Image (cartoon, rainbow, N blue to C red):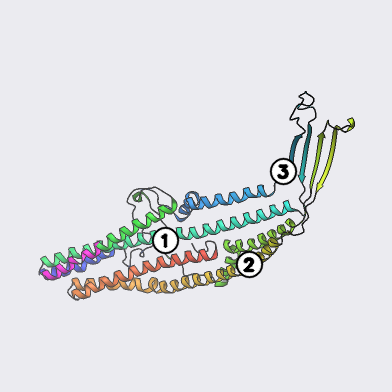
Amino acid sequence: MKRLTVWLYAAVVLPVALSARPGSSQASPVGSAAAPVPQTVAGQALTWDQVKARFEAANPALKADALGVDEMKAEETTAYLRPNPQFTFSEDGLQLAPHNGVWQPLIGVQEQSNLGYLIEREHKRQLRLETAKDATRVAESSHEDLERNMIFNLRSAFVQTLQAKAVVKLAHDDLEYYDKIIDISRTRFHAGDIAQIDLDRIELLRVQYESELQTALVNLRTSKIQLLQLLNDRTPVEQFDVEGPFTFSDQLKQLEEFRQTALDNRPDLRAALQTIEESKAAHKLAVANGSTDPTLSGWYTHNPSFNNPNDVNTLGLSVSIPLRIFDRNQGEKKRTQIDIDRSQQLTESARAQVFSDVDSAYAQVDSNITLLKPYRDKYLAQSTRVRDTVTFAYQRGGASLMDFLNAQSDYRVVQLAYLQLIGTYLTAASQLNLAVGREVIQ
């Protein structure tokens, strides 16, 4: 009679308890956005767009690099400045000793004022400005490239946090489910349906579930700390949370589309192309600097020592022309010409790197999608069905304890592997976004 009561309990109560647990065929898929981990402290969880906006506004490394771009813009003002005129004033003929017993130190002093100005030829000033503007454009593209790489690091930390939350939820649900199994097993033990050793083995296995939950909680906390560091945020970890879809899409565009998008958007490739233009402008400036720049001067002289009273006050003009016999800036002309070729070769290398990055990231994303499809379409449901069936059979005496424990282990392995594959897919998608130069996969 007791055994019949236990069987009726297992047949009626157990299916109802199992159907209510997350991960069953009636529950939401493991790791889906429909069932996020509850926040430990009430507060609004940040989405990816909010995290990205905070990062761009607060990250000190990114802000410091942006100031470097502003410095380059200030260099444009310096490059376009005109040469300063030169003013010289001199006095000569001071009386150092009395003449015929008379001390008149200023009576015969000669005074001269000179004003000179360097005339720059061959558009040197305009070429300096062009070179400075090219350097600014390169700095802006380099700043965008730095932001691109740092956004990838931020996205990776964001994905790790979402994955850690999903693993915490899985570990929590597994422990909750197993506690129901323990309660039912104790009821069977008291009814004399199972031995003490079987109950002990079932209860001892709970420590593994507890360990997995605590490890998942530590990993979640660590991921949040890394994310807060990138955000330069001092919010306590307990009050910080993020949310977003932790799933995958099996729709992937053709490789050629990603390649073309990368060629149009990669800031490092754009910086390489701009470096070629900067090198060309620098070569033009080097050629211009090899030309002769005359200096025009004019002066006014007051010389009372002349015998001719009409020559006391005089004006003069002069032109100073350097003779570029030896130094015609040959070294800079040659160096800048070589630098053009060097920039072109580096650009070709950058273009090849773009294709390599896109192809590698695309292959990784495509591989993850291939692995995830059978999990979504088959393995998740199978692992759940096997666990529920073996558990039900064990409670009715139709399966051994070893079968029951193996079914529990297989379920956890499949569910955890799926979550890890989702995290790998999202990281690979971030890598593809990094390779392309913008977010093509959300």
Instruction: Say which residue appears at 83% left-offset and 42% top-offset.
Output: 317
- What residue type is disc 3 on? Asn
Secondary structure type for disc 2: helix
Magenta segment, prevailing SS (helix, strand or loop): helix
Q: What residue is at 37 percent from the left and 63 percent from the top?
A: 31
**Direction top: furthest residue:** 102
Which residue in the structure is indicated by mark 2?
Answer: 342
- Contact flag, marks 1 and 3 (Cβ < 8 Å): no
Q: Which residues are magenta?
A: 195-210
Q: Secondary structure at mark 1?
A: helix
Q: Amino acid at mark 2?
A: Arg
Q: Is residue 86 visible?
A: yes
User: Quarter of the image holding residue 420?
Assistant: bottom left
Residue 84: which disc? 3
Disc 3 or 2, which lies upstream in sequence?
3
Mark whose residue sits in front, 1 or 3:
3
Q: Is residue 194 above or below residue 142?
A: below
Q: Quadrant of the N terminus?
A: bottom left
Pinpoint residue 365: horizontal percent, then vertical percent.
47, 70
Binning the other alpha carbons within 10 Å of mark 1 as few (below 14), some (14 to 19) or many (20 upward) gives: many
x and y, in percent, of residue 154 in the image: 45, 58
115 left or right, relative to 210: right
Closer to us: 236 or 171: 236
Q: Which residue is mark 1?
A: 159
